[in-house]
Image: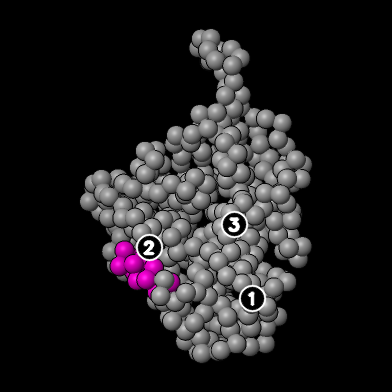
Amino acid sequence: MGLNRRKFIQQASAVSGLLLMGGLPAIGRPLADKVRVGIVGGRFGATFQFHEHPDCIVEAVSDLRKDRRDHLMKTYRCEKSYPSLEQLLTDRSIDAVFLATPAPDHARHTIASLKAGKHVLCAVPLAMSLEECEAVKEAVKESGKIFMMAETTTFMQGTITARKFYEEGRFGEIFSAAAEYNHPGLEALWFENGKPTWRHGLPPMHYPTHCTAFLISVTGERLSRVSCLGWGAGEGLLKDNPYQNPFWNQTAFFHTNQGHPFRVEVNWKGALRNAERGEWRGEKMSLYLPSGHAGTGTLITEEEAEGKDDAGFVHTKNKVTSFEFPRWWETEMLPEPLRHNSGHDGSHPFITHEFIQSIRNNRAPRVDIYEALAYTVPGIVAHQSALNGGQLLPIPNFDD
């Protein structure tokens, strides 16, 4: 293809608006002042770069635990803290909040923050039920505030590359795709000081967004039907979990609204490599991410040269090559202070920048409420399918 890493980086400035922001027009006037953000949640919330963004100030932080509040204050060089989200939301100097709180609280916390007049960036997933999804959507629409979900997969270096390839037509038609999120040993986080945490027994498909975003953020397709199977029978540490979930692992077979198959696996247990990866299979080109966030991918291009398979049969053979993904975080897609690597394959500075810029320019972010719903809802329905032995179920579309 003659498209190497150097050329990618040279092109980055020219494509950054279309690639990262989705070409969305501004729908209002930019803010004159810096965005003042409150950070809520002292674990995941402490892994972002808001204090380094030239258009942002970390105004305050919050966590229920003092040690985590102290950690947030040190990380973000912030002198103001609150012992609860409720108290932070009364601070009128705060424009926006980043909710890095437990997943079962996301819908409730998002709605409360929007009603308090704050823009919201929320960790994944959006919600735990279809009813909560509908309630969050209505709250966003009524508030007139910016909402964004902090999905890391959308801004991974491999996903950004695949999105560029797709926009340039290099895949041809992507006729199938697959994604997997393997996190064996996660049960170590199910209990803390002898007490269950929110992760105890969480259905794998209630945490689908690290997989669904691999396809949806690249092609814009929506997942329309699903059949899902689970492995597990409520044994061991699964007993008495608050979700009444019997499954350690789940595999879902999705149909898209463009008639394409999409396989998704979310696995908590087994002899597995940790993985957060996607595959895009096209007419003219296919792309496979490595198992981890590091390493080279695999690029396959359609060729006309003859080759032989392992049985000696002559056929047209495609070209298979290793592919080094560009480090987009080194480019002008980000402000200079944010041009460094981070967790989740360099995605955190992109999430930081996208949220702040969407507020300043009063425009929809790439992962707006409709994208967040498209990433989250299919997993909720997939879990119901698994509970019903793999029954094929329709997935509601929240785009209307």
Q: Do the residues labelled 3 and 1 touch (CB within 8 Å)?
A: no
Mark 3 or 1, closer to the camera: 1
Q: Which residue was labeled with disc 2? A: 202
Q: In this view, does 205 lie above or below 309?
A: below
Query: Residue visible at 40% across and 49% down?
Result: 222
In what element is the residue under mark 2?
A: loop
Q: Nearer the viewer, residue 356 or 237?
A: 356
Q: Which residue was labeled with disc 1? A: 31
Mark 2 or mark 1, earlier in chain: 1
Mark 3 or mark 1, earlier in chain: 3
- Residue 262 place in picture, x, y as percent: 41, 41
Q: In this view, does 147 lie above or below 288?
A: below
Q: Splitting the image into 4 quarters, where does residue 155 fall?
A: bottom right
Is residue 272 highlighted in magenta? no
Please tell me whether the stretch drawn in magenta is mainly helix, strand or loop. Answer: helix
Q: Can residue 181 be seen in the rendering of this structure?
A: no
Q: Which residue was labeled with disc 3? A: 21
Q: Which of 202 and 144 is in front in this view?
A: 144
Is residue 130 highlighted in magenta? yes
In what element is the residue under mark 1?
A: loop
